[in-house]
Amino acid sequence: MSRILVVDDEEPLRTLVARGLAMDGHSCLTAADGAEALDTLIAEGGHFDLLLTDIRMPLMDGIALALAAKQAFPDLPIMLMTGYAEQRERARSLDAIVEEVMTKPFTIAELRSTVLKVIERSIG
């Protein structure tokens, strides 16, 4: 299926998201923060079908990561996740580059469905 880079500073959630997406056959790489994710994107030449990142993280947050990733890889679809209302408001300014913002908590079924829609939109 698709290659997805999952970025979240909370290891249990990062693992849960990657495992949930793997149930649909997606291949997931993970990163613990935006800086690590940007390094991975660059090392992999941006060859991902989706960047799925938390917003609130140390070192480089998801918004800074989204901006840097879109500049380096303009065709890369980006989804954000957040559990904070103020972070969701910050993400509104990124409507032009972010496909979807998921509010935590979400179910794995909701995540899988939304990821599938985003990937299908980017292909079609």
Image (cartoon, helix red, strand yellow):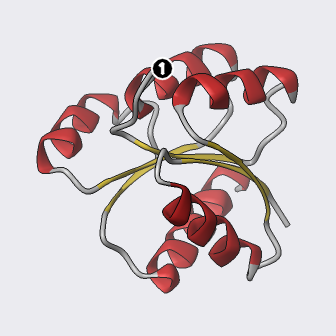
Judged left or right of residue 9, residue 96 is left
Judged left or right of residue 73, residue 54 is left
Q: Is residue 97 placed above or below 26 in the rendered structure?
A: above
Spot occupied by residue 15 in the image (x, y as percentages of width and height): 62, 65
Spot occupied by residue 72 in the image (x, y as percentages of width and height): 67, 15
Q: Is residue 50 placed above or below 74 in the rendered structure?
A: below
Within-10-Å neighbours for mark 1: few <14, some 14–19, many 20+: some
Spot occupied by residue 11 in the image (x, y as percentages of width and height): 55, 56
Residue lying at 58% horizontally and 71% vertically, measured from the top left? 16
Spot occupied by residue 124 in the image (x, y as percentages of width and height): 70, 56
Q: Nearer the viewer, residue 4 or 94?
A: 4
Residue lying at 87% horizontally and 29% vertically, measured from the top left? 44
Q: Nearer the viewer, residue 80 or 99?
A: 80
Judged left or right of residue 107, residue 119 is right
Q: Secondary structure at mark 1?
A: helix
Q: Residue at label 1?
A: 67
Judged left or right of residue 113, residue 104 is left
Q: Is residue 25 placed above or below 96 in the rendered structure?
A: below
Residue lying at 66% horizontally and 65% vertically, measured from the top left? 18
What amino acid is labelled 1 in the image? Leu
Does the image show residue 31?
yes
Residue lying at 21% horizontally and 32% vertically, measured from the top left? 90
Does the image show residue 74?
no
